[in-house]
Image (spheres, helix red, strand yellow):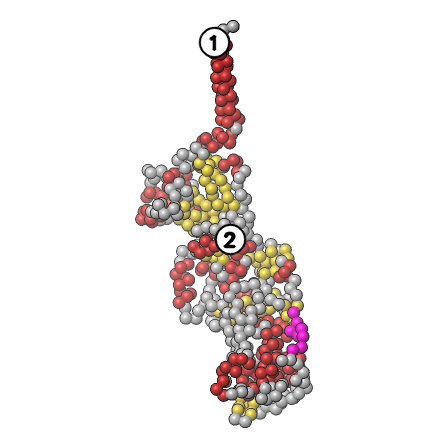
Amino acid sequence: MDIGNNRQQVIQMVFIAAAALLLVKAFVLQVVNGEFKQQDKASGAVARYPIYPARGLIYDRKGKLLVVNNPMYDLMVTVDAMDTSINVKRFCALVGITPEEYKKALDKDFRSGRFSRSVPFVFKSKISAEAFARFQEALPEFPGFEIVLRNAREYPAPVAAHLLGYIREVDGEEVKKQPEVYTPGDYIGASGLEKTYENELRGKKGIAYVLRDKLGRYAGAYRDGKDDIPVIPGKDIKTTVDLDLQQYAEYLLSNKRAGLVAIEPSTGEILAMVTTPNYDPNELTITNNARGDVYKKLVQDPNNPLFNRAVMAQYPPGSIHKTILALIGQQIGVWDVDRGVSCGGAYVAPGVRLGCHRHAHCGDLRTGIQHSCNAYFVTLFRTIVDMKGYKNPKPGLDTLNYYLNKFGYGRKLGVDYPGEQTGSFPTSDFFDRWYARDGQWKSIWIRSLGIGQGELQCTNIQLANLAAIIANRGHFLYAPFLQSFWGFKHHHEQAIPHKTSCWDRPQIF
């Protein structure tokens, strides 16, 4: 046997087998396996595109829309995919920009790492649907440019601007804190319910993986979209607000500086929340090109229309405070409902006169409330404070303050709305410091607290809550609330609140 010939035949067979295997593999990859064919077409370039979710809608309690989404578009550009022979003049005319604006939009610092010639970035943002319609058919003439759909807010009824709030572009700090959620150019709830329920309303962005050819042109979906992440729309909210009542309340307070809160006592639902002066919420939408000027004007307005007087302004409670004193006096056993107090047009004590209006004699608590008699309630207030003696007012004031706190004084109620203030009431320690040079202070010195004046401060929502407590015979829902349903399904923690008693235990200090 010719060993040399056998060896040559073996080598030839090995080469033939290897060549056959390579041919089969090439056939599988290029013909049978369409995925490789598609990747080869795109030279392996895969682009990652965000898909923005529709923000959740906001309804009133009857299902009327308060906030809707208005489509808008961002024009994106990939510099490396642009046609160098682009007709700039025609492009600018279609898009509605000047050649100078065109040049400025492309003038990026590509060395900074923030921008890349091969990665799309925003060329022009917040393009309205009407403007997009003018050039969408001509867009294929301009390689490297593409459109991304976004959503802006719109308000069918120009009311409840403070209550609903507005959205704005995220800042660098917000992106830094939640990079997995926000990227530059995203929008975020900046105030009102938009801010409180930002996590639920915004939804979750999806991701689309797209193949690009050597010139950056679209070459199809990567892996037929198998790796794409589906977008999750934001949740819709059905609020407790009654749109008709909200509109009527805003009409009543027009041309005034005031705040108003209406609560359904049996449930704690907020039916209306108004602050005036107000503004049209459509003026602060993302798509309004004059938005910056509008905001600047609102900030500079001496009437401070951006200040929410419903939950932030703090006032002496006035006469409604007298009803709370009446309840506390009876609860701790120092006042009888049939006790009368004389009033000759003023509360009079040695060296002191606190005026009152002329009215019939207050023979009991009912007529004292009926006439809102200052003399009656200063007497009641001093009786509570002096319950341990005229020279020892601290225990009485501490007992009073204990119950005032139970009624919601001096603390946030916990409403699902940003910016709520606490209000305040003076403590015995405060008066110890205030009257340190005068020695022991007396109830007569702080008599104005008996008529809801002096150092007392309450917010409008606290005053509305006081009225609800009286309507509920001493009970209140721990937090008046604005959101009752998610997508018209009960949000149980809010929809079924628990009653809290102002009289959970007697307390005498």
Foreground residue among 129 and 465: 465
Which residue, as the protein is rendered here, is positioned at the far top? 1
Horizontal relation, residue 296 to residue 406: left or right: left
- Horizontal and vertical percent for residue 174? 46, 55
Point out the tag, 2 or 1, that comes first from the N-terminus.
1
Q: Is residue 5 magenta?
A: no
| Residue for point 52% across, 56% down | 198
| Local SS, label 1 | helix
- Which residue range is magenta in the image? 500-507
Q: Quadrant of the C terminus?
A: bottom right
**Residue 213 shows in the view:** yes
Would you name the residue on which mark 1 appears?
4
Q: Are marks 2 and 1 in contact (CB under 8 Å)?
A: no
Q: Residues within 10 Å of mark 1 (few under 14, many from 20)?
A: few
Q: Amino acid under label 2?
A: Asn
- Gap in Å between the C-alphas at discs 2 and 1? 83 Å
Q: Which mark is residue 206?
A: none
Residue drawn at 48 percent across, 59 percent down: 190
Residue at x-position 53% and y-position 60%: 196
Task: Using the image as rendered, state which of residue 181 and residue 469 is in the foreground.
Answer: 181
**Residue 381 visible here:** no
Figure check: 472 above or below 497: below
User: Is residue 501 within the magenta segment?
Assistant: yes
Write down the residue under mark 2. Answer: 69
**Considering depth in this image, is 384 or 135 the residue closer to the camera?**
384
Work out whether residue 448 or residue 122 is closer to the camera in this orientation and state it. 448
